[in-house]
Amino acid sequence: MELHCSQGWDFSINSCVGGQSCRKSTSQFNSISPGWIDTDFTEYTGADAVQQPVHRVGNPMDIANMVLFLCSEKAGFITGENICIDGGMTKQMIYHGDCGWTLDMSSDMTSKKID
């Protein structure tokens, strides 16, 4: 619950401050809302991977690359934005049993640590 509360606060304050900054300075205010980010760099297979629209779980580099981009000159025209990095899960929003869709869990659901 803390994560959702902090993300909601982050989104609200970013929208408010980001909009104000456009009028008063050249500062940029953006936020990132991460999805499932595995910090152990585990490679997931089976249902854990297949449920993700990009067929993998996120890792810290997915977030780090966006932070580096937002800090670069290439992002100079982006402000007041919340960037969702979740492999498409928030757009998918389909759960087992919805609209006749079912998750076939018969595939191998093993995971291995990436060295």
Image: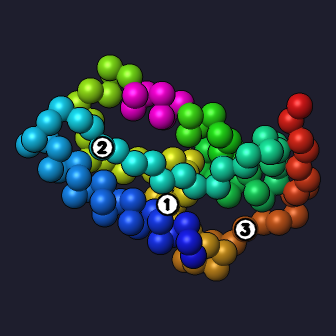
Quick one: 104 or 52, which is closer to the camera?
Answer: 52
Q: Which residue has dot 1 on it? A: 90
Extent of the magenta region: 65-71
Please tell me which of labels 2 and 1 falls first in the chain.
2
Amino acid at circle 1: Thr
Q: Mark 3 belongs to which amino acid? A: Leu
Is label 3 in contact with label 1 (beta carbons under 8 Å)?
A: no
The main secondary structure of the magenta stretch is helix
Q: Is residue 42 left or right of residue 66?
A: right
Question: At x 49% / y 60%, what residue is drawn?
Answer: 90
Q: CA distance from mark 3 to mark 1?
A: 17 Å
**Residue sticking out furthest to the front:** 24
Query: How many neighbours does mark 2 have within 10 angstroms: few (below 14), some (14-19), or many (20 or more)?
Result: many
Q: Nearer the viewer, mark 3 or mark 1?
A: 1
Mark 2 = which residue? 29
Residue 70 in the magenta stretch? The answer is yes
Q: Residue at x 86, y 35 (%)?
A: 114
Quarter of the image where the N terminus is located? bottom right
- For mark 3, what is the residue? 103
